Image (cartoon, coloured by chain):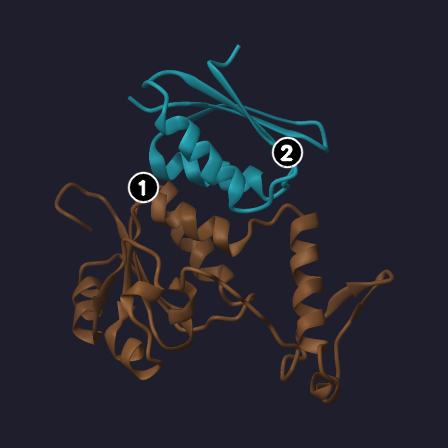
Chain colours: A brown, B cyan
Amino acid sequence: MSADGTKSMSIIVTKGTLDWAYPPFILSTTAAALGLNVTMFFTFYGLPLLLKKLDLQMSPLGNPAMKMPMAGMHMGMPNIMSMIPFVDAGATAMMQNMMKKKGVASIEELRSLAVESDIRMIACQMTMDLFEYSLDDMIGGIELGGAATYIEVATQSDINLFI
Amino acid sequence: MADQVLDAKGLNCPLPILRAKKALAGMAAGQTLEILATDPGSIKDFEAFCRTTGHSLVEQQNDGKIFRFVIRKAG
């Protein structure tokens, strides 16, 4: 808690698929709406969520819990199906379509709400170097930092999440 | 009559809360915001939103399809 009593939350964002991009952006924007100071630290596969142009994909591969509503039932997809070209693209399109129909915000929308809400976004410098990204590739208003930067934030936060 | 009305029908979590927060930010303390939503999760969420932010939930109605909330902005 800060000196004026404002609560705070930090999230380490490590996953960048369409489905896993949701929890960190939903929680961070909601926490900001509830008056918390929020910091997001983007590392490894979470880092591309800061790219100017998002191209989020998802795969049913290795995810037996992913059962899509289909013809009144819920259907999973055998792993072998993911080897067929365009199956992942099909699953991604299906998910996006379903989300639109159900009034779920897009990641682009949630991310701009996060920026508007003054959420502090830190891109992991090491991951930037590793995957050869530069600040020019990323949206504005973010900062670079490392593990120590995050730990300092975490010691001052009421809630620390790893997603 | 509320001072402002927010139509959040058809929007899913967390959009009704985010839109409400945005609307309240542009209002004066003591003014009221009426929110219409269809997300059943919004009932518990608006209660939690008000407890956490200090705004008061002065009215709450549910006709089974549309959920109506009136929030008075904290001063």
Describe the element under mark 1 as helix, strand or loop.
Answer: loop
Residue A35 shows which numbered tag? 1
Residue at x-position 58% and y-position 70%: A57
Residue B35 is drawn in which quadrant? top right
Mark 2 surroundings: few (<14), some (14-19) or many (≥20) residues within 10 A: some
Which amino acid is tagged 2?
A: Lys
Q: How many marks?
A: 2
Mark 1 surroundings: few (<14), some (14-19) or many (≥20) residues within 10 A: some
- Residue sitting farthest toward the right: A71
Q: Where residue A4 appears, x then y in whole percent? A: 15, 41
Residue A25 is drawn in which quadrant? bottom left
Q: Can residue A10 be seen in the rendering of this structure?
A: yes
Check the picture and name the quadrant holding the C terminus of chain B: top left
Image height of B40 relative to A141, above or below: above
Image height of A154 relative to A80, above or below: above
Image height of A125 relative to B15, above or below: below
Q: CA distance from mark 1 to mark 2?
A: 24 Å
For mark 1, name the chain.
Answer: A
The residue at which mark 2 appears reads as B9
Q: Where residue A118 appears, x then y in whole percent? A: 29, 46
Residue at x-position 39% and y-position 36%: B51
For mark 2, name the chain.
Answer: B
Q: Nearer the viewer, residue B57 or A116?
A: A116
Describe the element under mark 2 as helix, strand or loop.
Answer: loop
Q: Where residue A53 appears, x then y in whole percent? A: 46, 61
Which amino acid is tagged 1?
A: Gly
- Residue sitting farthest toward the top: B1
Residue at x-position 42% and y-position 65%: A49
